Image (spheres, coloured by chain):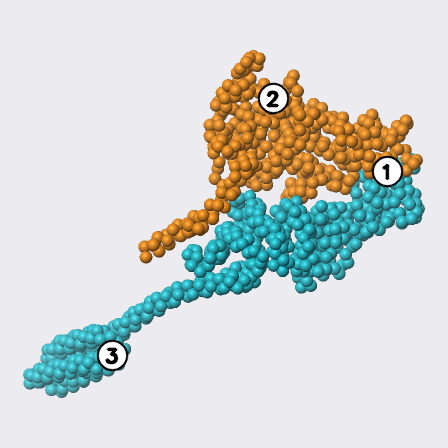
Chain colours: A orange, B cyan
Amino acid sequence: MNRRRAGRRISSHSQRRGAPSGGQWRQTNKDQWQDEGTPQVREVVGEQQRPRQHGREAGPRGTCQTMCPARELRDREAQNRLHRFEMLPGTERDRRPRGDPLRAVKEYSRPAAGKDSTNPTELRPPAVLLKTVRYLIDEITAPSHQHPWTEVYSFVFDRLRSVKQDMIIQRVSGSDCVAILERTVRFLIYASYRLCGEPLRLYDPRINDTHLQEYLSWLLDCYATGSEAHPNQEEFQALALLYNLGSARATQHIMELPERLRSTPAITLALSINQAFLERNPVRLLRLARRLNFLQTCALHRHLAACRRDLLLVYSHGFSSRNCRFPLERLSQLLSLDTLLTAQLCQTYGVEVNQDNQVVFSKAAFSEPEQGKLHCNLYHSIVSEKQKDLTVQNIIHGCA
Amino acid sequence: MLRVQVRTCSINLHRLVLLLCFHRLVLLLCFHRLVLLCFHHLVLLLCFDRLVLLLCFDRLVLLLCFHRLVLLLLCFDRLVLLLCFDRLVLLLWFHRLVLLLWFHRLVLLLWSDRLVLLLWFHRLVVLLWFHRLVLLLWFHRLVLLLWFHRLVLLLWFHRLVLLLWFHHLVLLWFHRLVLQIYEAIDNHDGSFCAELLSFKHPHVANPRLQLASPEEKCQQVLEPPYDEMVAAHLRCTYAVANHDFVEAYKFQTLVVQSFLRAFQSHKEENWALPVMFSVTLDLRIFANNAEQQLQKKAKGQPGEMLEKAAEQLMSCFRVCASDNRAGIEDSKKWGMMFLSNQLFKIYFKINKLHLCKPLIRAIDSSNLKNDYSPAQKVTYKYYVGRKAMFDSDFKPAEEFLSFAFHHCHRSSQKNKRMILIYLLPVKMLLGHMPTHQLLRKYDLMQFADVTKAVSEGNLLLLNEALNKHETFFIRCGIFLILEKLKIITYRNLFKKVYLLLRTHQLPLDAFLVSLKMMQVEDVDIDEVQCILANLIYMGHIKGYISQQHQKLVVSKQNPFPPLSSVS
């Protein structure tokens, strides 16, 4: 009788915990659990898992009030792993340069098995993270250096990644998270335009794109699940759509936004540009693109090449006849380029331009350029003319 | 025993009677003494008679009580009876005393006025009656209380009996179910076993089966892993009865996992396929319900539970797909299409359509693909058609969705309507417009305006129609595809212009005017040229644009080929 009573006690206890009772059950459950928790899986999951907004307990609280934890600064100083921007001025040439605590920023380190990344003295609280991001933009990105911008980019990119990692570990959410993400997204979009055409070893557009998509989807999640109003939401929804022009998923997402948000001018314009892209109406697209501001055009610029190609392709078929004479100025107006560049573009696509600056369209003549022949950065005038007197700082902080 | 009681009662009664007689005697003696002393003979006689009457009356009362007592003896406890009786006796004594007192008073007053005497006498009578009433009431009360207590006792007793029966029945039901499952497994009766483990079967509503900890009893009858499966299933019914779908989902996962272990050990037999169908269906349904519950409480990521369910189903699918040894009749590959359909439903819900591709490839490469049941084939073609639609492969999409629509059973109107929602845009893009009757029959009048606009080339009406039913189209996910109809609308509009002008060299201005008539805003010649060039590129118009003459020159033969011939 005693045994039966004990058995009943175990089962009721485990029922409270929600796990099944009995030795066999526990065995099978443990096997299950062990299969899931392999170290590689956990590492990737740690990087990609995003904070849940509601209902979960808060993550560890960081206490480090400087941009770089003291221990890391000492370690990197000792191992001579400081970046140029973090050294004390005057000590750059030394054998062991000294780090400047006011300029050093915590760097990104990949999570690994056995490494404890939740030590509160190593984590920076959200206020410090925002301060770090402001510093990175105001002091590093904005001023003009003698160093090439690719170096600035790689430094800021890496440090922003560690900011993101701190945010994930502490499960930050709310207005702080949104402010940091907005600035990061603006920086990456600007960088995607500015560094377009740089050699692959200095700047990889694919990596930039992957990270930008991640940041964007996190930001849009924050907008969707947060309860407070976000003043910049329409700007970023429009940026997301322009960056992912023609993507069914992005369009569907915009379609599912509330009516009030969808009817704001920025999003309406982005939607019409998207519609023009889907309809394959490059003339309309390029005309509408003139109404975009600088940052939006940066987001759009990687689709401009495809747009121009479409125009040339469609016109090659539409105007294809022996007597076709299409004025080059007209074409350059449509493409928003000057005549010289237009002629160069036509040449790249195999479209013939005769001596009188008339384009002879022909179905058969159009051909895709070889890989690497098309240099996108030659045709950036549509974007660069909008930059005019905007400073980088204003662009990224969004005060333009 | 009853006779003894009667005897004692009678003894008591006789005693009382004797006593009464004695008292009467005493009274009489007193009275006679008084008579000797008094002078109002008549009055005294009256009093005396009355007294006698009273005594007789009391005796009568007593007899009546006694009879009642006798009657009640048949249904009452001896103690109660005695109590009553003793109380009665006491009361009677009391009354006697009272009577005596009064009588003495009366006697004393005999010396006074005769009226006063009478008054007192009447008062006495009244009091006696009153006391009698009181006695009766008390008596009845006692009776009632005793009955009440008896009833309570009976009820309690019955309740105990009921509880014992209940537990007995619980064990009976439980054993019955487990034994049935055991038999079904033994006889390899897949469909019956599936019923017993499915949530569509009425046994899940039986409160007697909703046990919180059935493992031990399951282990007694069934072998592993079936014991875990059935125990998890019963826990699941318990959770469902409490409307806790998150728990139910967890337990159903255990059911599926333990079933899969058993299924994998079945070499060259597939009788358990119906069981797999029913447990996986329940898993998906619970994952849906759990998601809804979590969403209401605003916990967890959307799609989390469904993704986990999809992983489980994928492992079942792998078990089925990798069964290469058995012959066709015993092969587990017959389960592949059902599982793919379930997986499609999940992937479409969480919007991860790219995961459908490996499933489609697997089914296409299997040699059983035309031999599955019509219901499964219809569902499969429906989802594959929808996927093709999203990938903009409209010709195969039309093929699949038409197959699904034609082979769908006539009675499933709702399914036919769902297929039609996706078939209509595809057909419209290929130039086939639906009739009004069809739209009315399936309650899809939202498409009526769109159809009219496209076939007339009326851009204005098309925009209005798309705006009006925007929410419906967005919810079904066909808004973007319907926007593609704009190109068809342009083509129809320009064809009208061609038909009106009856010439092969159409001025571009004419098209601009037609677009302006449709209230298309800020369109100019450049855009008209672009639209025309696009239509030429896509093959909807045969001809070319002459920039110098600002004209569209179309071919003399069939300048606007029919839509179905253009891909």
State which mark lies toward you, 2 or 3: 2
Q: Mark 1 lies on which chain?
A: A
Answer yes or no: are tags 3 and 1 on the same subunit.
no
Residue A140, numbered circle: 2
Q: Residues within 10 Å of mark 1 (few under 14, many from 20)?
A: some
Q: In this view, does B80 lie to the left or right of A260?
A: left
Q: What element carries label 3?
A: helix
Q: Is mark 1 on a helix, strand or loop?
A: loop
Amino acid type indicated by mark 1 = Lys
Chain letter of disc 2 in the image: A
| Residue B553, numbered circle | none
Residue indicated by mark 3: B73
B160 or B488, nearer to the observer: B160
Q: Which of B312 and B183 is in front in this view?
A: B183
Residue pictured at 56% horizontal, 45% vertical: B304
Q: Which chain carries label 3?
A: B
Q: Do labels 1 and 2 share a chain?
A: yes
Q: Which amino acid does label 2 sit on?
A: Ile
Q: Is residue B454 left or right of residue A147?
A: right
Disc 2 is placed on an element classified as helix
Whole-percent x, y for residue A145 in the image: 64, 18
Q: Looking at the rendering, which quadrant does residue B272 occupy?
A: bottom right
- The CA distance from mark 1 to mark 2 is 50 Å
- Three-letter amino acid code at the position of disc 3: Leu
Can you identify the residue that label 1 sits on? Answer: A363
Task: Determine the residue positioned at 44% across, 60% down.
Answer: B221
Marks 3 and 1 sit apart, C-alpha to C-alpha, by 122 Å
Q: Is residue A347 in sight in this rendering?
A: yes
**Residue B306, image x, y percentages:** 57, 48
Q: Is residue B383 left or right of residue B502?
A: left
In the image, residue B90 lies at what x, y percent? Answer: 17, 74
